[in-house]
Image: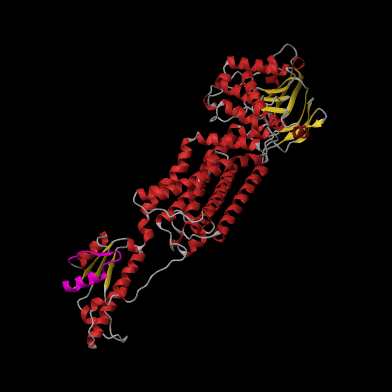
């Protein structure tokens, strides 16, 4: 135990004197949390949060105004209509407005066509900015069809001699629909996605100081010296676990604090805290062990600082890209979502979301935690195996 | 610990490559300073690393007295100490922190650790530098810290791998004097160096090895015959061709 404590003290002293390395471990994820939470806030809120401008081009200003009024709201705002269709195409190409609805001259007459499946329905054209998110385009498309349907129903009722106010026939007034999401919000908000995601990324970045110091220890002969002093190699590896576990816990505390204070200070949402802190601690600990295991494996496999930096850094970035840290998994195609299941960062993110987002219980975090701990054990065993297989510890020739 | 006996010790690193040590047989008597000489790549550091327990996979037999060295090492883990060729300590820690760390790793603690840190620092004359970061020391101080770490547990056999590389004449003279005093206290010292005059000055016995083989071994005065110098003998045995 004395030797393990001495190793932990040495590692802590060495790490505490590497100011740049510590700054990377703490400032990098905090910066990502603030920047990405703010940058992606509208994307996570969906179409309603974005104010998308549209214009209506119709034969008469009265019809254009009426349609614009009915189509406005819930994230869509009407803009002045361009002079003609060519000008409309130019405007949409520039993205101002993002949408132009072109209404043909015979639109009002076509509204009177009977709903018998034989008549030609009204024909409309929607010019759309290709940069517009598909979900918003779809939402506007549904609004246009809904408004057109209400106008047709109104026309039919008028023909049938039933007094009806077309403006009163709104889809939103058809019924009262309340949405209840089970276990918190259905999807993470920007801050709920980005705080755990970049925290995990930061936690896995301990691979850099762990492997760098290990390579330096091997290069300078300190590892060989310790081995000659009959210090078991497994103890040398365990000597890295304690200090970096504490670093990971400190990262978790500070990143949650960043989600609670920094992000709202910059105008973003406030991170909702989990109901079960014990479960959050379990997920954090499991993630930490996996990250440290990864660091030890890279450390043992790397012969030079360059190798350690490339293997650790690129490995982390790939795992983050695949695992839903950089791009949320729910926006990935189904095939990519399947691929993402191999990333330990995705397991960790599942665990954090189960606690922070879904307010889940122990059963919900069991699978990600078991996966992360199994990975940690496998990586530690692999590191020992690589060392034993190499047979030679020193660079002496 | 008794006499160190190496009988037919061979070693090769994993993968394709030459045999680094080829049936090395040496007798290193207890007490005194044994000089191990050889050109670059001769196998000196490999031999020292095997004796220190850093390298596995050597064939042949190594014993200390009547007991295999490996068994003795398990029984008395700190009976054999190493001062490696590299300055093998942590540059970001102070000298005192390095000494305390390596002492603790060898089982020292409490008052005994404090006492040994003080004694080793005094012996290596680094007391005034104890609070300084090891990475910011001069070359001579680094070598002395390297030696002090090796002396923390007072090993009976001390392996010194080129301990005077890169130091000024004053530090070298001090280190040689220190090594002589360590041998005077009854320790066995195995000393590798490229500096022939150093070996001639402090060693009782020498062995010259090249390409993993022992070319000559014995009492220094018997090895150097006909009034020639150790350097002349070395060049004669290992030839003048440049080594990789």
Task: Where is residue A134? Give x, y as percent.
Answer: 36, 65
Task: Where is residue A335? Give x, y as percent.
Answer: 49, 63
The count of marks equals 0
Task: Where is residue B88? Give x, y as percent.
Answer: 60, 29
Q: Nearer the viewer, residue A48 or B241?
A: A48
Query: Is residue B244 visible in the rendered structure shown here?
Result: no
- The answer to which quarter of the image holds residue B75 is top right
Q: Nearer the viewer, residue B49 or A270?
A: A270
Considering every residue shown, the one lying at the far bottom of the view is A160
Display coloring? secondary structure
Tell me which residue sits at (74%, 26%) in the image.
B214
Residue A197 against residue B211 in the figure, above or below: below
Quadrant for the N terminus of chain B in the image: top right
Considering every residue shown, the one lying at the far top of the view is B227
Q: Is residue A294 magenta?
A: no
- The answer to which quarter of the image holds residue A97 is bottom left
Considering every residue shown, the one lying at the far front of the view is A275
Tell me which residue sits at (62%, 47%) in the image.
A380
Query: Is residue A248 visible in the rendered structure shown here?
Result: yes
Q: Report the magenta residues as a range.
A: A61-83
Tell me which residue sits at (48%, 45%) in the image.
A251
Q: Which of B25 and B2 is in front in this view?
A: B2
In this rendering, position of residue B98 left or right of residue A111: right
Quadrant for the C terminus of chain B in the image: top right
Residue B133 against residue A252 in the figure, above or below: above
In this rendering, position of residue B30 left or right of residue A301: right
Residue B234 against residue A297 in the figure, above or below: above
Task: Where is residue B99? Give x, y as percent.
Answer: 61, 27
């Amino acid at each position: 135990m004395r030797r393990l404590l001495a190793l932990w003290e040495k590692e802590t002293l060495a790490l505490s004197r590497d100011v740049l390395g510590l700054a990377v471990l703490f400032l990098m994820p905090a910066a990502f949390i603030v920047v990405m939470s703010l940058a992606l806030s509208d994307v996570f809120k969906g179409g309603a949060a974005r104010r998308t401008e549209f214009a209506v081009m119709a034969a008469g200003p009265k019809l254009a105004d009426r349609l614009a009024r009915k189509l406005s709201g819930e994230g869509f705002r009407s803009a002045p209509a361009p002079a003609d269709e060519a000008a409309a195409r130019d405007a949409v190409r520039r993205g101002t407005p993002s949408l132009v609805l072109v209404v043909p001259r015979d639109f009002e007459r076509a509204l009177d066509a009977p709903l018998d499946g034989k008549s030609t329905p009204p024909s409309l054209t929607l010019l759309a900015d290709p940069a517009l998110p598909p979900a918003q385009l779809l939402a506007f498309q549904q609004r246009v069809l809904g408004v057109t349907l209400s106008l047709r129903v109104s026309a039919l009722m008028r023909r049938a001699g039933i007094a009806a106010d077309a403006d009163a026939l709104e889809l939103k007034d058809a019924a009262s629909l309340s949405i209840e999401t089970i276990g918190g919000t259905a999807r993470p908000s920007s801050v709920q996605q980005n705080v755990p995601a970049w925290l995990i990324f930061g936690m896995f970045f301990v691979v850099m100081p762990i492997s760098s110091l290990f390579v330096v220890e091997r290069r300078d002969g300190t590892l060989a010296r310790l081995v000659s002093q009959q210090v078991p190699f497994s103890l040398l590896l365990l000597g890295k676990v304690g200090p970096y576990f504490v670093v990971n816990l400190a990262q978790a505390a500070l990143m949650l604090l960043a989600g609670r204070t920094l992000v709202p200070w910059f105008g973003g949402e406030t991170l909702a805290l989990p109901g079960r802190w014990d479960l959050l601690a379990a997920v954090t600990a499991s993630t930490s062990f996996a990250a440290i295991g990864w660091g030890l494996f890279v450390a043992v496999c790397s012969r030079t600082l360059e190798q350690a930096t490339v293997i650790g850094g690129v490995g982390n970035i790939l795992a983050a890209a695949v695992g839903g840290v950089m791009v949320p998994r729910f926006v990935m195609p189904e095939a990519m979502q399947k691929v993402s299941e191999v990333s330990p960062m995705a397991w960790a993110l599942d665990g954090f979301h189960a606690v922070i987002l879904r307010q889940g219980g122990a059963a919900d975090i069991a699978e990600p935690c078991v996966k992360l701990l199994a990975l940690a054990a496998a990586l530690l065993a692999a590191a020992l195996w690589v060392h034993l297989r190499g047979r030679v510890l020193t660079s002496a020739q | 610990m008794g006499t160190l006996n190496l009988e037919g010790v061979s070693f090769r690193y994993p993968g394709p490559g030459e045999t680094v040590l080829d049936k090395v047989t040496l007798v290193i008597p207890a007490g005194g300073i044994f000089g191990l000489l050889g050109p670059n790549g001769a196998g000196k550091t490999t031999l020292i690393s095997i004796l220190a327990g850093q390298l596995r996979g050597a064939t042949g037999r190594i014993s200390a007295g009547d007991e295999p060295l490996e068994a003795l090492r398990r029984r008395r883990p700190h009976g054999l100490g190493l001062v490696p060729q590299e300055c093998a300590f942590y540059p970001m820690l102070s000298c005192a922190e390095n000494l305390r760390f390596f002492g603790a790793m060898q089982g020292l603690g409490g008052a005994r650790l404090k006492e040994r840190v003080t004694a080793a620092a005094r012996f290596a004359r680094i007391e005034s530098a104890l609070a300084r970061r090891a990475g910011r020391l001069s070359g001579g101080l680094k070598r002395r810290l390297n030696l002090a770490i090796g002396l923390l547990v007072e090993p009976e056999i001390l392996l010194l791998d080129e301990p005077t590389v890169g130091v000024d004449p004053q530090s070298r003279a001090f280190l040689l004097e220190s090594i002589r005093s360590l041998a005077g206290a009854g320790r066995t010292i195995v000393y590798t160096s490229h500096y022939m005059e150093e070996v001639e000055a402090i060693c009782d016995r020498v062995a010259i090895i090249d390409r993993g083989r022992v070319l000559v071994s014995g009492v220094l005065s018997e090895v150097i015959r006909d009034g020639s110098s150790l350097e002349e003998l070395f060049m004669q045995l290992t030839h003048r061709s440049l080594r990789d």
